Image (cartoon, helix red, strand yellow):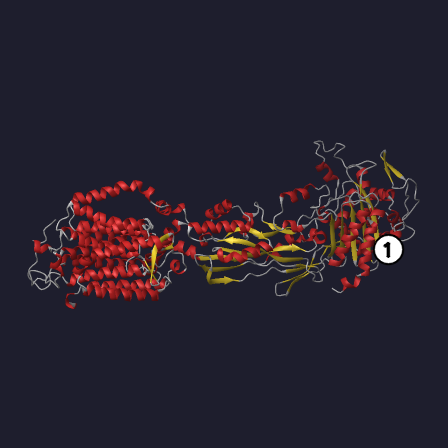
Amino acid sequence: MIRRLDRLQVVLAAMLASLGVMTVFSARADWQRQVVWVIAGAAIYVAATTFDYRRLRTVAPALYGGMMLMLVGVHLVGHTALGARRWLAVSGFPLEPSELSKLVLVVVLGAYLARTDRIGWRAFAGALGLAAAPACLVVTQPDLGTTLVLAAVTFGMLFLGGARPVQLGSVLTAAVVMVPSLPNLLRGYQQRRLEVFLNPSLDPLGAGYNLIQARIAVGSGGMFGRGWLHGMQGQLGFIPERATDFVFATFAEEFGLLGSLVLLTLFGTLLIRVLRSAGVASDRFGELLAGGVFAMILVQLLENVGMNIGLLPIAGIPLPLISYGGSATITTLAGLGIVQSVTVRRRRVVHEEPLPINGQESLLGTITRRAQA
Amino acid sequence: MSELPLQLGGVAPQPRWSLRLTAAATLAVLVIGLLAVKLAQLQVTDGSRLAAMAQANTIRHLVLEADRGIIYDRHGAPLVENSPVWSLVVVPAGLTPAARDRAEELVLLARLTGVAEEKLAAQLLNADPFAPATVKANLSQADELAINERLPELPGASIAQRSIRRYGEPMVFGHVLGYVGPIDPSQVKSLRAAGYQADEMVGKVGVEAGLEELLRGTDGWADVEVDARGQVKRVLETQAAVPGHAVYLSLDAALQRSTAASLAAGLARDHKTAGASVVIDPRTGEVLAMISLPAYDTNLFTRGISQADFSRLLNDPDKPLLNRAIAGQYAPGSTFKMVTATAGLQEGKITAETLLACPPYINVNGWIYHNWASYSLGRMNVARALATSCDTFFYQVASMVGDVTLARYARAYGFGTAKAIEMPGVTAGLVPDRIWKQLQCGVPDLNSDECRWSEGDTITFGIGQSYLLTTPLNQAVYVATLANGGHLLRPTLVHEVRDASGRVVQTQKAEVTSDVPASAGNIQSVREGMRQEINPPYHMNYWFRASGVPADGGGKTGTAQWGGSGLDLPTHAWFVFFAPYAQPEIALSVFVERGELSEVQAAPIGVDITKFYRDNLSSIRRQ
């Protein structure tokens, strides 16, 4: 199994997580705690790699149910921070179910879409329904960022799962139609963020402050950066949320354009490796899982870096593996572990069929694509 | 859905890059490319600009205000102190970031300072977010304590301390010390060029203004690194402030107080409201006391005076803001007669022994000029003429000397010259002559009666009227010149200057501006007349006897008409005096505005001052 491991993916994930710990250290967050989470994430990564991803299909309904329970729980007994209810205390640790929901949705949609080879209108509607339920609970926390990630994951998996252009188009059209009515749907602070994004000087001390300070930080990094632990904006607290949402600004100030390009290249390579895993998957479920993880990481990378450099409006989304935070780190590493599991159990060229690792597969009556072909 | 081809052969499978996977990969590459391009723009194209903004965020140039020098009397008694005042300062960027909490903070700030919340919000939102903005200056001690207690709940707010001048006895020392105040808008530009801060205090009048350079000191500065809350994290470079010099004035605080009290009492006795007195050391020119009444509370100005207070002072008919000692210009009247006497003697028109008549009036070209007495006082020499203050005697002398020569002697005694004393606003007075009159008259025909200098002008000039003007300071310098035998001294208010470490950087030395062009004998003859005036059988001696002060010195009273020409004009009362006679230590002038009788109203004040000086002589001489 070790031989079949995507070793490059392991190296990339390890490098990114290390850069994350370094940046979190520089941002004066609790770096030791972040190390603990990376180690915990690594353990889950190993476990997920060893675990036959195909068994996830069995537990998918249970995962889905659990996720919904937690999301409802957040609404009922969750902790409020920064104006949103996002946290659940699980045996003393703050847990952010909305972070976990990203990966759970990947597994659930993967399992659901893998049931059929093609995506008919019923399956299409079903998938949207499956995604809509948690999205509604998340958006009302309110957590626009995670909702965006859920939407992107859903769209990505539909696309990679082979949804018809007309189906994808209708989703996009619906989204475009909804944008004008967006201001009404958004909460006050979200509207404000959007306005301020369009004109940061509207409120240089409030919502615009974050945007301006992050941009200044990134820009002042210049070509080579100010050096680790020497970012003025970051060290002196001018960057808001410098270890979480605006961790990229902290990183970019200290490591400059050069460091940022290295970081982007690491992410790019990781994303391609994840897609490659989809390409070698032995079944449709595996392919969809990898595709979902790909979409999950890509959209977070785009939105997080994008808002840090003033390209996109501010939405509270962590930068995978870099931002401080247990739920996000563990979710990302678990997702990559699942992808690794898919890679390990890839198609074997010596065998026509992938060896069933246990009997669960046939017992469930699911049909692999190639078996059908 | 595209059919994925089955891969056969080989140990490792080649990934099937389906169309959609390829599209996804392309999308990832595009997204990363887009981020990279925007990053390059921010970090390279805009990099230096944004780095400068980061620098501006974090590096703050602070001005460390120098303590203003303390002003002492000649014995080292402080006349002013720097007392701390507090103001509430807010760095807008340091306020609580969350909108709702920030609103709460603003409410608390508004409540603590009493500034309207909307005003507060507007001020802070329009200010440079990273520069400290003064929300409320001059907090009361109670406010300061209340705010200090709540500071932990007020991120971004801090209490700044600066010092303000507090004048101990403004009604006694106010006119000399003057005051500091905020820089006038009209001065801002020139003072900024001289390194002043816009909110700095600057000397406005009095020695605070005249000695600004010495008192101000040199501001220091510090470049500090601050965090987003405005807290100083690191001092990068600093230059300590150098406090201003300590100035020891020539004033004797005790004599100043006593002079103020004597003058106030004298004025009150005769229901007068305004007057002035200057006491000078005739050996050095040092001003020992300088009083102008009414006085006002200079402390009103140090925080920026209210419009109401300012209007009240400005519209007061007694003009408290006017320092009469240096800026009030009045005719000297009979106190001028020593000049006429000196001129007559030195020009050889009379000798000390020459006897002239003292008729009740003289007739000049059909115009009648009266003596103060309606009867003849008989023939007399110059000393007796001074002692009796015979006007008709000096009409004759003035006529003999002529206006041009008389003007020359007047100038030699310091009339008509602004004294270079250490405060602004000193006026020169006026020594008229025929050319001045022609330039003054404002009629095109310079030979008209209005413009031509008449014989009448000359003879009234001889008794200190005509167009002659002087100031109480000028009078004191004049009598000091008579006291010391004809040396015109530059008057000064500064005894000594020390730097912050106590090292003496400047000591006052007597500075003779010029000598009166008269022989010692002639000046002695004039002094003799002044000695006689205060001795029996003349009335003036009464005040010395009444006060128990030996009449050892020389004095002259003067009741000067003002406000035009004619017989029943209002008058000002003067008394000039020096003592002791042989080796004078003080020379003084007393001025009573609208005084009718100088012997009764001005002279007793001078005697009072002299009495205090004599009784406390040792305290002055010790220095």
- Depth check: B532 or A52 in front? A52
- Depth check: A7 or B252 in front? A7
Residue A210 makes an appearance in the image: yes
In the image, taking residue A290 as reference, residue B505 lies left or right, namely right
Image location (x, y in percent) of residue A72 = 31, 53
- Depth check: B256 or B582 in front? B256
What is the total number of numbered labels drawn onto the structure image?
1
Q: Residue furthest bottom?
A: A2
Q: Note whether A209 is above or below A330 in the view shown.
A: above
Residue B484 makes an appearance in the image: no
Image location (x, y in percent) of residue B299 = 65, 51
Q: How crowded is the residue under tag 1: few (<14 C-alpha within 10 Å), some, or many (20+)?
A: few
* Image quarter (top left, top right, bottom left or bottom right) of the C terminus of chain B: bottom right
Please, which chain is the residue tagged with disc 1 on?
B
Q: What element carries label 1?
A: helix
- Depth check: B152 or B52 in front? B152
Q: Note whether B306 is above or below A86 in the view shown.
A: above
In the image, taking residue B2 as reference, residue A175 lies left or right, namely right
Label 1 sits on residue: B547
The three-letter code of the residue at mark 1 reads Ser
Q: Quadrant of residue A242?
A: bottom left
In the image, taking residue B34 as reference, residue B355 lies left or right, namely right
Image location (x, y in percent) of residue B241 = 55, 61
- Residue located 39% across and 58% down the image: A233
Image location (x, y in percent) of residue B28 = 22, 53
- Residue located 30% across and 51% down the image: A138
